[in-house]
Image (cartoon, grey):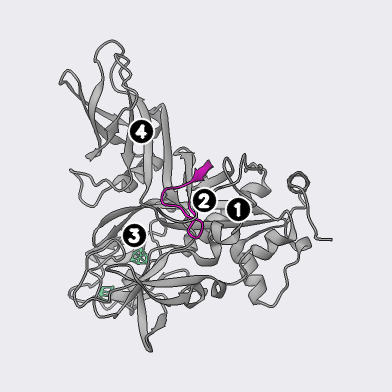
Amino acid sequence: MPKKRKLSEIRKKVENGSAIILTAQELIDQVSEGKTVKFEDVDIVTTATKGLMSGLMGIFSFRLSPPKTLRKFTEVDINGIPTFPGPCPNEYLGIVDLIIYGTTQSQTIDNYCGGSLFRDIVEGKQVEILAKSAEGETIKKEMRLADMQFAKLAGTRQAIKNYNAMINCETYNVDTIFSCLPFSPNKSEITFSGCGALNPFQNDPEFESFGVGSPVLVNGALGYLMGPGTRNYIEKPNMMTIAPFEGMKPEYMGAFKTSYGLEPICSLAVPIPILNEKILNNIVKSDKLVKLTILSLVGREKVGEITYGDVWDNNFLMKFNPDACKNCEECKAIDKCPTNAFIIKNGMISAIDRSRCFNCGNCTHLCPEAFDLDLKLVSFEDTAVPIVLRQSDRYGAIKLAEHLKLMILKGEFPLRKPISKLQFAQTIK
Ligand code: SF4
Ligand code: SF4
């Protein structure tokens, strides 16, 4: 008889303190140490991912003027980022509803996009709103999250079931969202995205444990899975979620500067209740079991295949050693951190802001003396090609999976059945 348990039984175990919850990383570590994890050994596995998620948008509603004064607001910028006011015109109410995309760049602040703004809002910083009414009147207002009536983050395409590695097969440099620096030519370097064995969809390939309406953690705040996201298909499922900015943690979000502009960062964690042995069997036990396709950057043809075990191997955290810094006349790395994580003193990098560091490895690639991270070499066409950038932060994802585990153990995260199963397209039309 295949073993199974009900969600209500897991909830009871959480209540009486006997539930066994493992993060996906803990499970991988136990298996790599030779332990067999049986059905009796685990009730819930927490999965997570942290990466660049282009389809993010903030949805806000707040008052800009007293009622009965202005008809409606037709243009609204926040910290210089143009927004989309509407769809509710709210005539003569003085309130504006608007959407702001995570990828939109500010017209007044350098290296600042919607992703930067979302993090500032969560940090409680004051933001500057510049609005124009239908009558042509201009309103300037400063506001914080606490002043806003409604502030939520939605994503159209999140937690994609892992992604790809990129290599530039052309003979020229390419500016691209897949690299911080211009992508070097002639198959000389590789970048990749995806948290491998920690990814939620990777661990639930049959969509049995989470679905429409499931509670999820978005940047550390309790949110909900709305359904499949854009451009989804069965082999590359993704999700749409919504969550309040209130309760999010800045370290899980922000902006990442690529050589083709800024991209917003987002982190998601999803619990997988182990309701039967099949669900446990589907939990990924090693990164070596998750394929990673290498694509040609220009044209996106498949040119190779490795596994996430070739790129993730307990090499999650970048370490900075200030004593190893040679105080070069011209620092190669100082203005090249894509998340602004360097703390600069007297014109030198003195420390790393850990709440901003994405463990991407760009600094290590530029200065292996002062920045320590095993970025790995990948065998490609009989050559060892170096990885120069990671566009997913496995270390951050592990932290979020641990955060979710603690929340469940403390009874702060609801365990609920989905309203319905996720349905994905068979192919992309
Ligand atoms: S961080 Fe590296 S490149 Fe920059 S000054 Fe120190 S040793 Fe030189
Ligand atoms: S690994 Fe280095 S370059 Fe990357 S985010 Fe951290 S400090 Fe910046």
As measured in the structure, the alpha-carbon distance from the residue carrying label 3 to the one carrying label 4 is 24 Å
Specify whether tag 3 is near ligand 2 (CB below 8 Å).
yes
Say the numbered circle drawn on residue 424.
Answer: 2
Q: Amino acid at mark 2?
A: Phe
As measured in the structure, the alpha-carbon distance from the residue carrying label 3 to the one carrying label 1 is 37 Å
> Ligand 1 shows up in which quadrant of the image?
bottom left
Asked if the residue under mark 2 is in contact with the one under mark 3, i.e. CB atoms within 8 Å, the reply is no
419 or 43, which is in the foreground?
A: 419
Secondary structure beneath disc 2? loop
At label 4, counting other C-alpha atoms closer than 10 Å, the crowd grade (few under 14, some 14-19, many 20 or more) is: some
**Residue at (25% x, 66% y) in the render:** 334
Residue matched to label 3 = 341
Magenta stretch containing residue 299, yes or no?
Answer: no
Say the numbered circle drawn on residue 266.
Answer: none
Q: Is residue 388 above or below residue 379?
A: above
Q: Is residue 129 above or below residue 349?
A: above
Asked if the residue under mark 1 is in contact with the one under mark 2, i.e. CB atoms within 8 Å, the reply is yes
Secondary structure beneath disc 1? loop
Kindly report which numbered mark, 3 or 2, lies closer to the viewer in this rendering.
2
Magenta stretch containing residue 227, yes or no?
Answer: yes
